[in-house]
Image: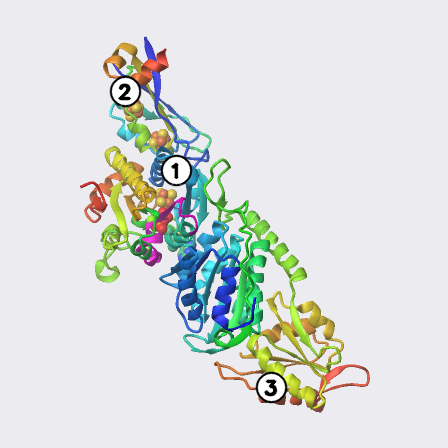
């Protein structure tokens, strides 16, 4: 099964909410806290591990503030032809 | 190289090519068009860039673009076209780009006419666009000098990263005179360290005239002013005739200086101690040399093909130490040596030196 | 066994600078796509951008290639000057709709007519963003702006200018496409169009223009998300998406 996670550059984020609106799994939210520029930065709240690493949030982010990672179990990645994952694991 | 009969506009074009012109962008307008037509033929022959732009606005911005790459670039136009270029000229000045602009003056204001005129002196010496700047402005009086100053224009433009104007009028542009062209310059200069050509193996370069912070823009402007001060110190150029013993000094540039010279010769033949001071750089105006003459001369007479523009610089240089008179014809009306001679005679009659050494106009004494 | 792979990271074609754009402004997406395209095509280091006058005037602070700033509307002329003396470099302009479709319409049409080997990125947000939200030549009928306070009335202010349709008329234009930045699928297509436009220049095919429908949440007076809906509902009917010239057949 493919799992994902994102890292938001919270100082770069302007809290526009586009990533929140487009995340198909509904796991991105705006934080209650403020960053240095006074924006509520986006953050991943994904206790159930729903993020698939689909990159949609990064695609719509105007600030290029999101990095997306995908986690594979090696077995799954082999069946999916995940060469990179195999290389990364070895 | 041998002397040959050359037309002013074409001689400038060929001189630019020999000075290493990489790119020309222009738009047709009389009395400058031969320059464009000549380069339309010659530049492609030499595999150099030539574009007939859709307007002078586009042409000057193409000049801006090519100048950003550190190339030798030129455009040419006349009054109405130069007016359209002013925004671009200001950007070139603001971004400190080297570029050469040939302005072949015609009569104005408005569409005016296509006759030779000098009514764009203010436009081409004061700022040539918005913001605090002045171009470096060269004014040849013969085809040979136009050739020589074209080469100099590119050198000065590069040396100072500066807008340089070659200011002539329709007479000189259309005139055929024997002159000698220089040979082709060999040294193709490398890309300057400020120019853009792709950031391979080095940090990104940005060329702009935008400084949003007032303090930053003030610093930038102070640097521009410092450069202008250095240019004003080093680059004042003029030519003189019979200045050593002149009572009356006629000041004239370009075509008007040719007419004035005839008049001065005629005055000399009649025993009048008249000299000719011919500014070659209009900006910076040759203040030092003229100021130096002020205490010795009885009067100055500015002769221009306009309503009196350069005369203001003459007055600044003379600074009230002698009377400054003006004679001019407007609208492209041909100015004849006889008229200038009469203006010289009149000025001589009207002025005298008082016993205490003060130079005054007789007319003022009478009043 | 578990392995983790980075599947998306900020492109190296963007500098580290934080943008000055308003939250949710899609200028930022267009910048990112441009940077990604330049990076993926391996041309970032031989590219020179021409920034225009509008909110994107500081594009050079964000896209990590050589850049020059052009006067309002004149970027295609500046790009022409650059390309003619540096024919082996990639030259692109980045212009707003006031810049390109109003004051600079002549420059872009003639650059297209000449078939200049340049790439034009045209950000159509239907408004003058930088000067505070005046009507643009691309404002749809009825749009309320500070200079059309009762809504754009075609009887008095005329009709929107469709740039792609105009430019596609020029024989010198090789690739002309209009895309939108209002949802992930369209953003992917926008990226592809930008790549095609740059490839067009790399292959010497001629002039390329990509229009991107974009938002101005601030001057439209909307949330960033509502602004994206507005693009879909109000702009796309006036500015149909597609490849107008030189696309895949
Ligand atoms: C010659 C000139 N006229 C007017 C302006 C003022 N001005 C600056 S930006 C702009 C409009 C920008 O709108 P657009 O091109 O749509 O860009 P946006 O800000 O919407 O991205 C105007 C009119 C200027 N800088 N120069
Ligand atoms: S990668 Fe996809 S699922 Fe994960 S947070 Fe981003 S949009 Fe949501
Ligand atoms: S899209 Fe980007 S800038 Fe907007 S809230 Fe999400 S991370 Fe922040
Ligand atoms: S004013 Fe409009 S176009 Fe300009 S940065 Fe803000 S949202 Fe973007
Ligand atoms: Mg706009």
Magenta-highlighted residues: C85-109
Where residue C75 appears, as percent x and y from the top left, is: 39, 52
Disc 2 target residue: A52
* Chain of residue at mark 3: B
Q: In the depicted view, which residue is nearer to us: B89 or B243?
A: B243
Vertical order, C95 against B327 (above or below): above
* Crowd class of label 2 (few under 14; some 14 to 19; many from 20; radius 10 Å): some
Q: Secondary structure at mark 1?
A: loop
Instruction: Please tell me the numbered disc located at residue C43.
Output: 1
Taking the image as shown, residue B40 lies to the left or right of residue B348, namely: left
The answer to whether residue B233 of the structure is visible from this angle is yes
**Residue B39: horizontal and vertical position, in percent?**
43, 63
Mark 3 and mark 1 in contact (Cβ < 8 Å)?
no
Where residue A13 appears, as percent x and y from the top left, is 39, 31
Say which residue appears at 31% left-offset and 43% top-offset. Answer: C203
Which of the 4 image quadrants contains residue B183?
bottom right
The residue beneath circle 3 is B340
Please state the chain letter of the residue tagged with numbered disc 2 in the rendered image. A
Of all residues shown, which one is farthest toward the front? Answer: B2
Identify the residue at the far top of this view.
C1
The answer as to whether callout 2 falls within 8 Å of ligand 2 is yes
Please say whether residue A46 is visible from this viewpoint.
Answer: no
Respond yes or no on whether mark 3 lies under 8 Å from ligand 1: no
Which image quadrant for residue A58? top left
In-image side of A59 versus C49 (left or right)? left
How far apart marks 1 and 3 lie (CA) works out to 64 Å
Q: Quadrant of the N terminus of chain B?
A: bottom right
The residue nearer to you, when weighing A29 against B309, is B309
């Amino acid at each position: 099964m493919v799992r994902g996670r994102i890292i938001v550059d919270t100082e770069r984020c302007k809290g526009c909410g586009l990533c929140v609106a487009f995340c198909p799994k509904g796991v991105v939210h705006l934080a209650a806290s403020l960053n240095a520029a006074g924006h509520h930065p986006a953050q991943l709240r994904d206790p159930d591990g729903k993020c698939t690493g689909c990159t949609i949030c990064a695609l719509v982010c105007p600030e290029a503030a999101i990095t997306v990672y995908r986690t594979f179990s090696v077995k799954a990645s082999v069946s999916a032809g995940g060469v990179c994952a195999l290389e990364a694991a070895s | 190289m041998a002397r040959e009969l050359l037309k002013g506009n074409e001689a400038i074009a060929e001189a630019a090519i020999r000075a290493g012109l990489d790119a020309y962008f222009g738009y047709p307008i009389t009395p400058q068009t031969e320059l464009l037509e000549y380069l339309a033929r010659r530049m492609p022959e030499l595999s150099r860039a030539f574009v007939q732009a859709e307007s002078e606005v586009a042409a000057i911005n193409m000049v801006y673009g090519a100048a950003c790459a550190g190339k030798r670039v030129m455009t040419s136009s006349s009054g109405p076209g130069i007016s359209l270029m002013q925004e671009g000229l200001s950007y070139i000045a603001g971004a400190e780009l080297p570029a050469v602009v040939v302005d072949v003056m015609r009569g104005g204001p408005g569409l005016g006419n296509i006759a030779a005129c000098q009514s764009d002196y203010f436009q081409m010496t004061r700022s040539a666009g918005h913001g605090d700047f002045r171009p470096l402005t060269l004014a040849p009086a013969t085809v040979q000098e136009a050739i020589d100053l074209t080469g100099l224009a590119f050198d000065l433009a590069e040396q100072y990263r500066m807008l340089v104007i070659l200011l002539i009028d329709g007479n000189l542009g259309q005139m055929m005179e024997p002159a000698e062209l220089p040979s082709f310059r060999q040294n193709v200069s490398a890309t300057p360290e400020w120019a853009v050509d792709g950031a391979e193996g080095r940090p990104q370069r940005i060329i702009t005239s935008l400084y949003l912070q007032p303090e930053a823009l003030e610093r930038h402007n102070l640097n521009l002013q410092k450069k202008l001060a250095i240019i004003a110190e080093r680059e004042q150029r003029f030519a003189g005739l019979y200045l050593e013993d002149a009572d009356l000094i006629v000041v004239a540039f370009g075509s008007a200086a040719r007419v004035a010279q005839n008049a001065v010769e005629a005055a000399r033949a009649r025993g009048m101690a008249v000299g000719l001071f011919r500014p070659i750089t209009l900006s910076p105006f040759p203040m030092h040399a003229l100021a130096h003459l002020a205490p010795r001369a009885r009067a100055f007479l500015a002769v221009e093909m306009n309503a009196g523009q350069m005369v203001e610089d003459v007055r600044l240089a003379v600074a009230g130490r002698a009377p400054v008179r003006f004679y001019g014809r407007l609208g492209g009306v041909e100015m004849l040596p006889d008229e200038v001679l009469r203006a010289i005679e009149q000025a001589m009659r009207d002025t005298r030196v008082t016993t205490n050494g003060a130079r005054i106009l007789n007319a003022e004494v009478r009043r | 066994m578990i392995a983790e792979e980075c599947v998306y990271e900020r492109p190296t074609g963007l500098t580290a600078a934080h943008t000055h754009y308003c939250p949710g402004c899609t200028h930022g997406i267009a910048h990112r796509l441009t940077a990604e395209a330049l990076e993926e095509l391996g041309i970032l280091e031989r590219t020179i951008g021409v920034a225009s006058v509008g909110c994107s005037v500081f594009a050079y602070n964000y896209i990590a290639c050589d850049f020059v700033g052009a006067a309002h509307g004149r970027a295609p002329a500046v790009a022409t000057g650059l390309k003619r003396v540096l024919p082996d470099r990639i030259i692109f302009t980045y212009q707003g709709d006031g810049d390109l479709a109003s004051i600079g319409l002549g420059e872009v049409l003639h650059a297209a007519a000449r078939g200049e080997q340049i790439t034009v990125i045209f950000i159509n947000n239907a408004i003058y963003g930088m000067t505070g939200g005046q009507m643009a030549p691309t404002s749809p009928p009825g749009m309320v702006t500070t200079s059309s306070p009762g809504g754009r009335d075609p009887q008095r202010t005329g009709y929107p200018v469709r740039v792609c349709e105009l430019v596609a008329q020029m024989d010198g234009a090789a690739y002309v496409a209009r895309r939108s930045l209002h949802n992930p699928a369209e953003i992917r297509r926008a990226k592809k169009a930008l790549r095609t436009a740059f490839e067009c220049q790399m292959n010497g095919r001629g002039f390329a223009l990509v229009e991107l429908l974009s938002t101005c949440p601030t001057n439209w007076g909307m949330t960033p998300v509502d602004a994206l809906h507005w693009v879909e509902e109000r702009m796309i009917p006036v500015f149909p998406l597609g490849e107008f010239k030189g696309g895949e057949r």
